[in-house]
Image (tube, grey):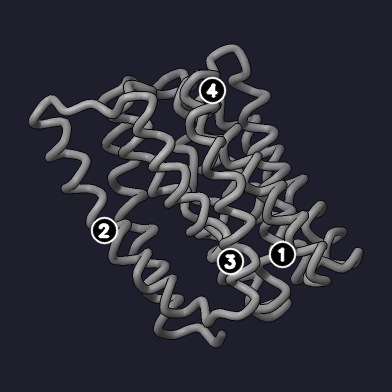
């Protein structure tokens, strides 16, 4: 029954993340922590996220902004390895609490940037990648942090979803290899992650029809709502869930 509930939740989380580019980890982590404990939940989610991001990138493959992705990944990948290594010796509760407040701050910050006509240039993504890559190694999800920067760069809908997913895929593979290197990713955990990831992949494919029907303004509004929800869930997890 637990696995049926997790797979059903994974299908819904995959559909949601396929629409807005994030949300799967935020929805799944409390359930994974309840079912398997906090130490195993993060590696399971790391494997599942690889499949989810691969699926989302494949669905929108033709709209990937390769230039933006290259600038982002050049620093995000090595910093993700550093962050994942740091996670093994750090209490994640403090990090999750800080990220929760940061997610809430991102909504007015993005609107402030847009209101002043400020845009993110490609080279700015080198800095963004370094910060987000390190944070991604520490916690299960930092997808919402990517949102305002990629939107300010000019990506929306399929282009945003595909480019963000490809960058997150590179980070996810890096985290998984780091966990494996330090014996935090046994074969049994990989198998659990693959099962959860399969449900996320199906959800990502189902989401394409919803995205095609959204206009750009509604897409941005939906992501603002999810940013607030993501921040509140992270704060709840930081202060109430066992670590």
Residue 167: give its label. Answer: none
How busy is the neighbourhood of tag 1: few (under 14 within 10 Å), some, or many (20 plus)?
A: many
**What is the C-alpha distance between the residues marked 4 and 3?**
26 Å
Residue at the location (68% across, 81% down)? Answer: 37
Is label 1 or label 4 in front?
1
The quadrant of the rendering that contains the N terminus is bottom right
Q: Position of residue 33 (x, y in %)?
A: 63, 75
Which element type, helix, strand or loop, lies under badge 2? helix
**What residue did someone put label 2 on?**
104
Residue at the location (46% across, 47% down)? Answer: 130
Q: Along the horizontal axis of the image, is 103 left or right of 163?
A: left
Q: Position of residue 229 (x, y in %)?
A: 35, 58
Is label 1 or label 3 in front?
1
Q: Along the horizontal axis of the image, is 30 left or right of 54?
A: left
Residue at the location (58% across, 66% down)? Answer: 29
Q: Along the horizontal axis of the image, is 75 left or right of 152?
A: right
Which element type, helix, strand or loop, lies under badge 4? helix
**What is the C-alpha distance between the residues marked 1 and 3?**
11 Å
């Amino acid at each position: 029954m637990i696995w049926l509930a997790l797979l059903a939740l994974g299908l819904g989380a995959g559909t949601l993340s396929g629409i807005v580019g994030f949300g799967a980890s935020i929805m799944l982590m409390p359930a994974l922590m309840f079912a398997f404990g906090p130490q195993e939940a993060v590696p399971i989610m790391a494997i599942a996220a690889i499949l989810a991001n691969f699926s989302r990138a494949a669905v929108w493959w033709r709209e990937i902004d390769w230039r933006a992705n290259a600038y982002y990944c050049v620093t995000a990948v090595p910093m993700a390895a550093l962050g994942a290594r740091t996670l093994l010796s750090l209490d994640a509760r403090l990090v999750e609490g800080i990220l929760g407040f940061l997610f809430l701050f991102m909504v007015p910050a993005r609107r402030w940037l847009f209101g002043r006509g400020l845009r993110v240039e490609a080279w700015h993504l080198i800095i963004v990648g370094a910060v987000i890559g390190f944070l991604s190694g520490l916690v299960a999800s930092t997808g919402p942090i990517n949102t305002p920067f990629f939107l300010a760069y000019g990506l929306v809908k399929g282009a945003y979803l595909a480019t963000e997913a490809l960058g997150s895929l590179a980070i996810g593979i890096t985290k998984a290899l780091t966990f494996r290197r330090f014996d935090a990713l046994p074969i049994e955990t990989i198998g659990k992650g693959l099962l959860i990831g399969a449900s996320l992949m199906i959800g990502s494919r189902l989401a394409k029809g919803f995205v095609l029907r959204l206009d750009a303004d509604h897409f941005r509004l939906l992501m603002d709502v999810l940013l607030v929800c993501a921040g509140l869930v992270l704060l709840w997890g930081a202060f109430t869930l066992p670590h």
